[in-house]
Amino acid sequence: MAVIEKRRSRDLPQINERIRFPKIRVIDTDGAQLGILTPNEALQLAEEKELDLVLLSDKAEPPVCRIMDYGKYKFEQEKKAREARKKQHTADVKEVKMRYKIEEHDYNVRVKQAERFLKDGDKVKATVMFRGREIQHSDLAEELLKRMATDLDSVGEVQQMPKKEGRNMMMLISPKK
């Protein structure tokens, strides 16, 4: 039972009565330093202003606390975290499929698609599909993929050279940093 209580108190933020240090450096709401006080003195100052005493850094000597509205502070932290998540871009793998007997115009369309994907920050998986006896011409498919790699050299770099996987031959291209 005591172990559970200890673990719970470790998860809770160190504010008001939970601050257990002999001396702390206190910062006022406007950023002015009030000096080094005992936690009880600092807590009295915070209660007079109807605010909370929040531990900012326990690594400093003495630990740094600030008088602020903890609810508002917590909301601001969550808001920053949400904004950071929103701006994050995960690199997806987009696929461009073709056959080794592809016509020139169709090939150019695939290259343009792959270029757009790479510019958006996604990886591109270029796949050449074989049907029936076409698999005998895997050398032509490899040539086609290498040609695509040279055409996309300005926006991407080959992450995985062309390799056969069953009835397909694939190559992975990642965007240049």
Image (tube, grey):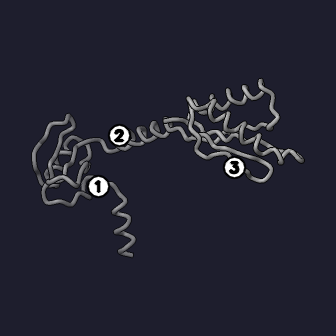
Q: Position of residue 149 (x, y in %)?
A: 63, 35
User: Contact (CB < 8 A) between labels 2 and 3?
Assistant: no
Closer to the chain start, of discs 3 and 1, is: 1
Closer to the chain start, of discs 2 and 1, is: 1
Q: Is residue 175 left or right of residue 146?
A: left
Q: CA distance from mark 2 to mark 3?
A: 56 Å
Q: Amino acid at mark 1?
A: Gln
Q: Position of residue 97 (x, y in %)?
A: 75, 38
Question: Residue 28: which quarter of the image?
Answer: top left
- Along the line of sight, the residue nearer the viewer: 149 or 28: 149
Quadrant the N terminus occupies: bottom left
Residue at 23 percent across and 55 percent down: it is: 58
Residue indicated by mark 2: 72
Closer to the chain start, of discs 2 and 3, is: 2
Residue indicated by mark 1: 14
Q: CA distance from mark 2 to mark 1?
A: 15 Å
Residue at 77 percent across and 25 percent down: it is: 104
- Along the line of sight, the residue nearer the viewer: 19 or 162: 162
SS state under label 2: helix
Q: Is residue 15 left or right of residue 135?
A: left
Q: Name the front one of labels 3 and 1.
A: 3
